[in-house]
Image: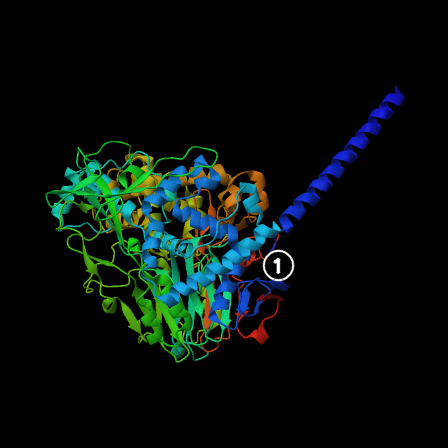
């Protein structure tokens, strides 16, 4: 018996050894597989499309500094280097925007492809190519040559990034239209309001007019014919709307510029932090480009040449989203006998019908058509209930025009003054952006730039009749009448997606501005300091003061106390009363306050509309704020009165808030912390496929402060994941344009084995900026020499 036990023990030891050996071999093989596609970042590398040698130095944060003897080689090298670090991201971006994800993923993305084919981003990019001059087209072609040189080498050497192997495909050649399509996607991400029009149309069908009126930021009092048309021509809206495909309603930014009169250095300081989705890799790619014709540093979207935001030797600039109404819905009446014909001024017009058949990996090709009226693509079949309605929606959108934003970017990069920069802005039409500017000559300036439509009737808040020439656009706000400020007396200019014009402005931009709290805090800090430093601006970008709470918390506490007669929430009320109104991660009060403000929306609206309508109801915070202000000022709100008045409404939300928080974090409220819920995430696309891949590709979550209403923008989903905020932070003193200060979370590289894959996660959380130089002698790092053959 003992011998038998010994044999089994011996075999178990042998088996364990074999398993361990196989595990080691598998680990070595996996490591080799992952490492073989790491970018080459030092030594020499032959790139046959170059005319002369190019030097690429990656500094200690992985920022590539490209030094070329001609612009041609500079843009070729830019394409090559971007592809080294971000080719899979670039390929996925062009596929998503073009509606071609299903070719590599399968049936799961068919609806996504339908969505983007209907939005016609690639068709708009193809149309826009004709708007470019030869110089700009040449830049696009040089850039594409660089990307394709890398693709060809990686295919030949079998060193394509691991994502391609995991999905089982190889990237196609890069084209100039691919770059323009990615540019159109950014217009999509920053310029959407069509879903809001669709929601209001639905509201007019389903609520009394007075009740629906309260769901408008500003009700169109003088548009009775438009309201009547919406009521009489119902379009089936609710039913299958996928709100996940909509741009985040909080896509925006902070930017400001301060004149030398208010800085310690005596020269202007500029700060910018665009608010977009947070992911791995970052939406931004930081670069420095230098040739005899230019020396420019900043960020660009992977897949596009040039530098869209940053500085050169003479100027610096940044943007926030204007957020104008640039998408209109038209109520189109189809011909019952010929459904692709639509009525216009008493006649039937044939719409354009595009074959957009969708190839599906491991499946059959899906037949799909996009129907385009004189106003734009028909949206109804894509987004709404599958019925045969008597009316449909088409969409008109500025980004579907032929536009040439890249030509503007090339102009920015080489501009030497405000006059040069403003001239370049004429080509930047979609999306409309708030540009702030500073130059070493002391000038500070601002322009709300882009195409903003002038309507024959209506103000863009509701769909309008599509069967009459009485409606539609009659041009755009003249470029020289767009809001512009140069060297204001206040000594600073700031925007945070806030209202940028007053009632006296003669044109309509939008009624749906961001909540004002980020802007008010920036203004408050800048007004109080006449000796501002770069460090002050970094601190302001990380500021966590909550002016939303400053406005509403006193009134909310009054309501809570009025209803809490038995003292159920005495501890919670005391916590809120003692709060300094800073969204610090260690504090419990922000957790209660922000949950409460979300629960207020649920109490007011959620049970009175289908789930998909609730999801597309952008502006819930603005509308809720409006209803609360009205109620606390003694006015009447149907929505609030239906809940028993403002005190009862607030108390219901408080009960839901505390029930949820006790379930999540326990009944001891003294131990609650904002950071236990509010946690920074930078998720990779592959991380959504399984928990194992998530653990490997996603950054570890980090508890952080701030919120969507603080200058340190950090918006979270309902699970607390902070997945939206300052995708890039940038501060520069134009008195010394040899360097700037940056954070690009989570890091520069898209390769999981790179040292720069997620090395800026804690930098992002803590506000630790890196300094990026532009003089070659100041730049330290690993240098790759790209040699011409």
In screen coordinates, is 535 left or right of 483? right
Color theme of the render: rainbow
Q: Residue at x 18, y 47 (%)?
A: 464
Q: Residue at x 58, y 43 (%)?
A: 695
Q: Residue at x 54, y 60 (%)?
A: 81
Residue projecting furthest to the front:
789
Residue projecting furthest to the right:
3
Residue 637 on image: x %, y %: 22, 44
Residue 472 on image: x %, y %: 18, 52
In screen coordinates, is 188 left or right of 396? right
Secondary structure beneath dot 1 equals loop
Mark yes or no: residue 744 visible.
no
Q: Residues within 10 Å of mark 1 (few under 14, many from 20)?
A: some
Image quadrant occupied by the N terminus: top right
Residue to which mark 1 is pinned: 40
Residue projecting furthest to the top:
1
In the image, 665 versus 479, the foreground residue is 479
């Amino acid at each position: 018996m003992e011998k038998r036990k010994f044999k089994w023990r011996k075999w178990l030891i042998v088996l364990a050894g074999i398993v361990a050996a196989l595990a080691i071999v598998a680990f070595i093989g996996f490591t080799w597989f992952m490492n073989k596609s790491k970018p080459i970042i030092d030594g020499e590398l032959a790139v046959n499309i170059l005319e002369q040698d190019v030097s690429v130095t990656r500094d200690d944060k992985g920022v590539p500094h490209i030094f070329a003897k001609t612009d041609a080689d500079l843009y070729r090298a830019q394409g090559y280097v971007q592809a080294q670090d971000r080719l899979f991201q670039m390929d996925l971006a062009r596929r998503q925007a073009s509606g071609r994800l299903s070719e590599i993923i399968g049936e799961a993305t068919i609806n996504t492809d339908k969505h983007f084919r209907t939005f016609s981003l690639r068709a708009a990019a193809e149309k826009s190519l004709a708007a470019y001059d030869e110089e700009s087209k040449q830049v696009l072609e040089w850039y594409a040559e660089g990307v394709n040189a890398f693709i060809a080498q990686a295919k030949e050497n079998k060193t394509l990034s691991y994502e391609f192997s995991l999905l089982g495909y190889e990237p196609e050649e890069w084209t100039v239209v691919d770059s323009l399509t990615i540019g159109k996607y950014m217009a999509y991400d920053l310029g959407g309001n069509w879903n809001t029009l669709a929601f209001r149309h639905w509201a007019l069908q389903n609520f009394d007019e007075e009740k629906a009126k309260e769901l408008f930021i500003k009700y169109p009092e003088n548009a009775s014919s438009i309201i009547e048309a919406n009521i009489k021509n119902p379009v089936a809206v609710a039913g299958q709307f996928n709100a996940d495909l909509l741009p985040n309603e909080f896509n925006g930014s902070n930017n400001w510029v301060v004149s030398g009169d208010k800085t310690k250095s005596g020269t202007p300081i500029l700060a910018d932090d665009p608010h977009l989705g947070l992911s791995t890799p970052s939406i931004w790619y930081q670069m420095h480009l230098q040739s005899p014709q230019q020396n420019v540093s900043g960020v660009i979207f992977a897949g596009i040449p040039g530098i869209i935001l940053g500085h050169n030797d003479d100027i610096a600039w940044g943007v926030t989203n204007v957020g104008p109404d640039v998408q209109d819905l038209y109520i189109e009446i189809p011909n019952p006998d010929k459904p692709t014909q639509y009525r216009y001024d008493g006649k039937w017009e044939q719409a354009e019908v595009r074959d957009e058949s969708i190839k599906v990996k491991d499946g059959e090709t899906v037949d799909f058509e996009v129907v385009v009226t004189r106003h734009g693509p028909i949206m109804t079949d894509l987004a709404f209930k599958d019925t045969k309605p008597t009316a449909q929606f088409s969409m008109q959108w500025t980004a579907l025009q032929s536009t040439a934003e890249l030509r503007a970017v090339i102009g920015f990069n080489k501009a030497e003054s405000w006059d040069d920069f403003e001239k370049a802005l004429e080509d930047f039409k979609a999306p409309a952006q708030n540009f702030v500017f500073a130059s070493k000559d002391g000038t500070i300036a601002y322009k709300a730039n882009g195409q903003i439509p002038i309507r024959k009737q209506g103000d863009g808040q509701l769909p309008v009749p599509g069967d009459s020439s009485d409606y539609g656009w009659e041009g755009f706000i003249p470029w020289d009448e767009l809001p512009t400020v140069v060297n204001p007396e206040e000594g600073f200019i700031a925007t945070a997606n806030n209202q940028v014009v007053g009632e006296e402005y003669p044109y309509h931009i939008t009624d749906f501005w961001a909540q004002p709290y980020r802007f008010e805090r920036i203004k408050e800090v800048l007004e109080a300091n006449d000796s501002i430093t770069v460090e002050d601006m970094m601190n302001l970008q990380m500021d966590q003061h909550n002016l939303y709470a400053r406005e509403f918390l006193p009134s909310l506490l009054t309501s809570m106390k009025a209803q809490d007669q038995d003292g159920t929430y005495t501890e919670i009320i005391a916590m809120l009363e003692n709060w300094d109104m800073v969204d610090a991660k260690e504090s419990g009060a922000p957790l209660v306050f922000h949950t409460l403000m979300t629960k207020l929306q649920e109490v007011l609206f959620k049970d009175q509309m289908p789930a998909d309508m609730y999801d597309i109801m952008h502006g819930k915070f603005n509308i809720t704020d409006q209803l609360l202000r009205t109620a606390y000022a003694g006015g009447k709100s149907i929505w609030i009165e239906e809940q028993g008045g403002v005190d009862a409404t607030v108390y219901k939300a408080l009960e839901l808030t505390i029930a949820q928080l006790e379930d999540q974090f326990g009944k001891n409220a003294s131990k609650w912390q904002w950071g236990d819920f509010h946690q920074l995430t930078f998720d990779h696309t592959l991380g959504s496929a399984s928990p194992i891949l998530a653990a490997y590709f996603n950054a570890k979550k980090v508890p952080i402060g701030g919120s969507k209403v603080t200058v340190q923008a950090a918006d979270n989903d309902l699970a607390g994941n902070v997945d939206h905020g300052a995708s890039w932070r940038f501060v520069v003193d134009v008195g010394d344009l040899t360097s700037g200060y940056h954070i690009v979370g989570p890091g520069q590289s898209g390769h999981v084995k790179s040292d720069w894959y997620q090395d800026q996660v804690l930098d992002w959380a803590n506000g630790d900026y890196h300094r990026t130089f532009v003089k070659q002698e100041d730049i330290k790092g690993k240098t790759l020499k790209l040699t011409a053959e």
